[in-house]
Amino acid sequence: MNCSRAQKYISLLLDGEATPEQKRLLDFHLMGCSVCRRSLEMSRDISRVTRKLQAPAPPEDLEDRVRRMIAEGSDRRSPGLGRRSAVLTIPAAAAILMIALTLLPLSSPGESLVETTVSTLADYQPKSGGLHLSSKSGIRTAPLSEYTRQASLISF
């Protein structure tokens, strides 16, 4: 298994959608790949933090406003929407530009941003005590279904 497939399996695992086979393959990959282990730990940390966030409460008069709009048959756009979208678009574009300019110095000349990200993941130290990949202990073998290839005839 390669790291890009492992990242997909990590997402499935965190969403609770990974099959037992995917969990087993990911578990085996994580035993040998410190970058993906750190990525999993970082993703788990982010998930823990986001679970603690509360959804904003809707305005108290929301239902009344929606019912009023339905009763009025208002399906036209609000006045001034063009100006409002420009007012929101310009700061958003500026923020994206600032983020891009901030991230550019992270990579050295001749080093891509992907290589920089991989090295950053390799240096990451998770807050939790350690990574527990499986409750089973002992020696485990590679899942052969991911490593099969066509046989070839070799002559000496």
Image (cartoon, grey):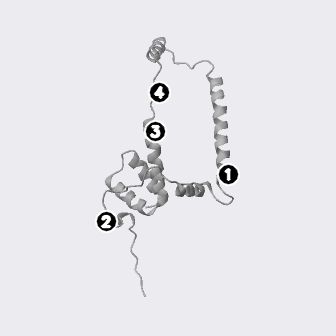
Label 1 belongs to which residue?
Answer: 105
- Which is more N-terminal, label 2 or label 1? 1
Front tag of 1 and 2: 2
Which mark is in front, 2 or 4? 2
Amino acid type of disc 2? Gly
At x 39%, y 49%, the residue is 13
The disc at residue 151 is none
User: Dot 3 corresponds to which residue?
Assistant: 50
Q: Distance between the residues labelled 1 and 3?
A: 29 Å
Residue at horizontal 43 percent and vertical 42 percent from the top:
48
Q: Earlier along the polypeptide chain: callout 4 or callout 3?
A: 3
Q: How far apart are marks 4 and 1 (CA)?
A: 36 Å
* Residue 153 placement (x, y as % from top left): 40, 80
Kindly state the secondary structure of the residue where label 4 is placed: loop
Image coords of residue 150 (percent x, y): 39, 71
The correct choice, above or below, for 14 with respect to 57 in the image is: below
The secondary element bearing badge 2 is classed as: loop
Identify the residue under disc 4. 56
How far apart in space, not on screen, are marks 2 and 4 (Cα)? 47 Å
Q: Position of residue 57 (x, y in %)?
A: 45, 24
Which tag, 2 or 3, sits closer to the chain's start?
3
